Image (spheres, rainbow, N blue to C red):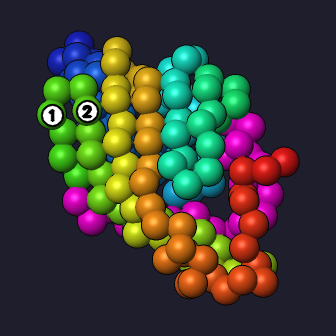
Amino acid sequence: MTANNTAIKEVELQDPQAVVEGFLDACSALDFDLGMTFIDEHCVYKNMPFHTARGKARIKRDLTSMQKSMNLFEVEMVNIAASGKTVLTERVDTIAGRFFRVEIPLMGVFVVENGKITEWRDYFDWTSVFGRMGRSVIRNPFKS
């Protein structure tokens, strides 16, 4: 890699939108180890209908726990906007497991500092998800 390419790559790694896109791409590949490389050690993740996870280790534990019940996680980016260190995403996350598949329209807010996600908030209507999945398969995917 030339010095110019290295400089471009370093700028991309600092670009908040590129960081968020890289994180979501890794999650879509179910590669949460790679996804964690985009997360700051002290990141706070608020999954508004459920709970708040504080710290990289807890976030990884939550994602890994969720992964046990699914074989598909896809992120369809509807819209993305960045202003300074804040990135807003309008997405449709599709999650599927052996006995379920659900598409979740949601809004995400990410704050990126020094190339790492320091805050991550997802907002969605749980009653809409509940209706899409059916009562028999609903459970909190973050409970271990």
- Which quarter of the rendered picture does the N terminus lie within? top left
How busy is the neighbourhood of tag 1: few (under 14 within 10 Å), some, or many (20 plus)? few
Q: Give the range drawn in magenta.
A: 60-79
Residue 62 sits inside the magenta stretch? yes
Report which residue position mark 2 lands on. 86
Quarter-wise, where is residue 126 in the image?
A: bottom right
The residue closer to the viewer here, 128 or 90, is 128
- Look at label 1 and name its amino acid: Ser
Q: Which residue is drawn at 76% across and 78% down?
A: 137
Q: Which residue is drawn at 52% across and 24% down?
A: 43
The residue closer to the viewer here, 36 or 102, is 102
Location of residue 38 in the rendering, given as x and y in whole percent from the top left corner: 48, 30
- Look at label 2 and name its amino acid: Thr
Location of residue 121 in the rendering, given as x and y in whole percent from the top left corner: 44, 42
Residue 1, above or below 81: above
Location of residue 124 in the rendering, given as x and y in whole percent from the top left corner: 44, 61
Residue 41 sits inside the magenta stretch? no
Residue 75 visible in this rendered orientation of the protein: no
Number of disc labels: 2
